[in-house]
Amino acid sequence: EPEVTQTPSHQVTQMGQEVILRCVPISNHLYFYWYRQILGQKVEFLVSFYNNEISEKSEIFDDQFSVERPDGSNFTLKIRSTKLEDSAMYFCASSERGGAETQYFGPGTRLLVL
Amino acid sequence: GQNIDQPTEMTATEGAIVQINCTYQTSGFNGLFWYQQHAGEAPTFLSYNVLDGLEEKGRFSSFLSRSKGYSYLLLKELQMKDSASYLCAVRDRASGGSYIPTFGRGTSLIVHP
């Protein structure tokens, strides 16, 4: 069964450093998403992406964040200058269509900012 | 999805039925999702409701009342593997006009023999 994959599974970085989290969505999916979950807290939506554009973003997704689909398979989340409070699990998801369509989540990248 | 309330924790017996409630307040409701999340894992989609009524999918059913700002997830014939956190998420109109999902804190369900 096709699945969303994410790399790395864990990343440790120093405050102020840039990180890039990578995702490979399911191949025939057209809509892509990033979520984060701080340890012990609720899941938070960051951004959705379709047709090479951001379609929706939350207040969390400020200028420090960016997303890109650099090729036909990868979908990346970049954090330009990490802060301690960026430490969280970051989940990528994809869906065939938008709206109510089932979103398939990747296993997540655990980011720790020191 | 400014205020989404779910019970923090519930316990139930294997084979029983459990109902997990979710109440919400929105400015522009555009659907409600239920997800299952096992500890340390990613959420898994269970259901989506945008119209009032009951949606049934195997052992799981989800109900929505838009006028009451209320939904529930019903789990039948509980199995030990159903022990997980159940997340209610509401798509609501954000200040910028787009619709984004807001998640509740989740209900931790413990199924015991």
Image: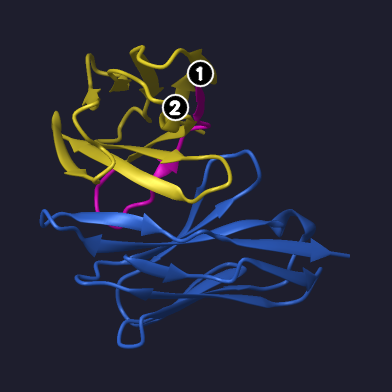
Q: Earlier in the sequence, mark 1 or mark 2?
A: 2
Q: Colour of chain B?
A: blue
**Chain under label 1?**
A
Q: Residue at x 15, y 54 (%)?
A: B98
Whether the magenta-drawn stretch holds residue A110 is answered as yes
CA gap, disc 1 to disc 2? 6 Å
Residue B89 point in image, percent of width and height: 40, 61
Tell me the quadrant of the picture where the N terminus of chain B can be found: bottom left
Q: Colour of chain A?
A: yellow
Amino acid type, label 2: Leu
B59 left or right, relative to B95: right
- The structure residue drawn at horizontal position 72% and vertical position 57%, both measured from the top left corner, is B83
Q: Which residue is mark 2?
A: A84
Q: Please tell me the numbered disc located at residue A114.
A: 1
The stretch in magenta equals A96-114
Q: Nearer the viewer, residue B2 or B22?
A: B2
Please tell me whether residue B36 is drawn above or below residue A77 in the rendered image: below
Going 58% across and 46% down the picture, which residue do you hit?
A40
Coordinates of residue A53 in the picture (x, y in percent): 13, 32
Location of residue A37 in the rendering, given as x and y in whole percent from the top left corner:
47, 41
- CB under 8 Å between discs 1 and 2: yes
Where residue B100 appears, as percent x and y from the top left, is 25, 54
Q: Amino acid at mark 1?
A: Leu
Q: Residue at x 31, y 22 (%)?
A: A79
Instruction: Count neighbours of disc 1 (C-alpha within 10 A) and say few if under 14, some if 14 to 19, many if 20 or more.
Output: some
Q: Secondary structure at mark 2?
A: helix
Tag 2 subunit: A
Where residue A104 sits, quadrant-wise, is top left
Residue B51 - label: none
